[in-house]
Amino acid sequence: MDSIPQELIDTIIDNVPESSLLSCSLVAKRWRRKSQRRAFDTISFSFEEDMDCWCTDIPQDSDGISSYVRRLKIEEISSWAEPALFSRMLESLSSLTTLLMDATEIPDELPGHISRGEFGNGITTLYLGHSSYTPAMMAMILSLPNLKELCIENCEVMPEGPLPTHPVTPQRRPLDSLGLYGSVDGVAEALAESQLTFGRFSSNVGITGVAQLLLVSSEMLVELKLYDSAWFLRVPRPSRDDSERSSRCFLL
């Protein structure tokens, strides 16, 4: 076993099915780390109890299992018995790049921890789906300094109370892409009022506020996809001096 190059071992592990990763991790020490990296690349939780067990039992080691996680999915936690648990979870995942939240509440204190730089700097992809739009949701979006891709699906602003708005943080870079799908009434207006900008935008028909949202990013928009849309939109063309940008519009 010692004569096999590590590169070959890594290639083998990269190509085995996920069901074989446990067996691969038991072959030898040189197989363990790569196998565990693949096995723990993505984790998901549907219960607070499971998240609490992770935070309690898995050491927050900069080179251990918690550092292998790059994608985290949390679903069906509509309210938190222990809101601080979400922050503990994100703090334990030093290599996290993708956060997927489906029908899950965002604790009010979470954006504050992110804005103070306690965690979340590595998150570049955020998906929010099947939940109610809250001030904490917008605050979290705007507090993630390196967010590149944002997708919001079936999130509605609750009818009671004024529409919450939040200023963009100074370090907030433009998004590479923004996607709005399903029922997201009010979300587009809130994003536009917060001056969130992006280079690529995709959406389906019937979303209020898309015009205002596109106007905010008109100078940097390079790709627009509107599915099942009867709209006719004028997409700004780049100047003659800007050879690196190209504007593309798709009405599908």
Image: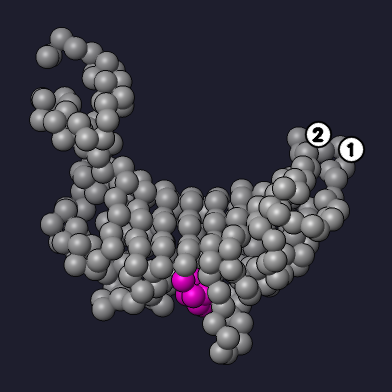
In the rendered image, the residue lying farthest to the top is 3
Give the color scheme: rainbow, by chain, secondary structure or one colour.
one colour
- Reply above or below: 67 against 38: below
For disc 2, the marked residue is 243
Q: Quadrant of the N terminus?
A: top left
- Secondary-structure class at tag 1: loop
Task: Say which residue appears at 41% left-offset and 48% top-offset.
Answer: 97
- Secondary-structure class at tag 2: loop
Task: Say which residue appears at 26% left-offset and 76% top-offset.
Answer: 82
Relative image position of residue 210 (x, y in whole percent): 72, 64
Disc 2 from disc 1: Cα separation: 7 Å
Residue 4 shown left or right of residue 230 in the figure: left
Relative image position of residue 22 (x, y in whole percent): 16, 35
- Which stretch did the figure color magenta? 131-137
User: Identity of the amino acid at label 1?
Assistant: Arg
- Reply above or below: 153 against 234: below
Relative image position of residue 217 (x, y in whole percent): 73, 57
Task: Say which residue appears at 27% left-offset and 56% top-offset.
Answer: 92
Please indicate, yes or no, whether residue 217 appears anywhere in the rendered image: yes
Q: Residues within 10 Å of mark 1 (few under 14, many from 20)?
A: few
Which residue is at the front of the view, 64 or 103?
103
For disc 1, the marked residue is 240
Residue 249 shown left or right of residue 146 in the figure: right
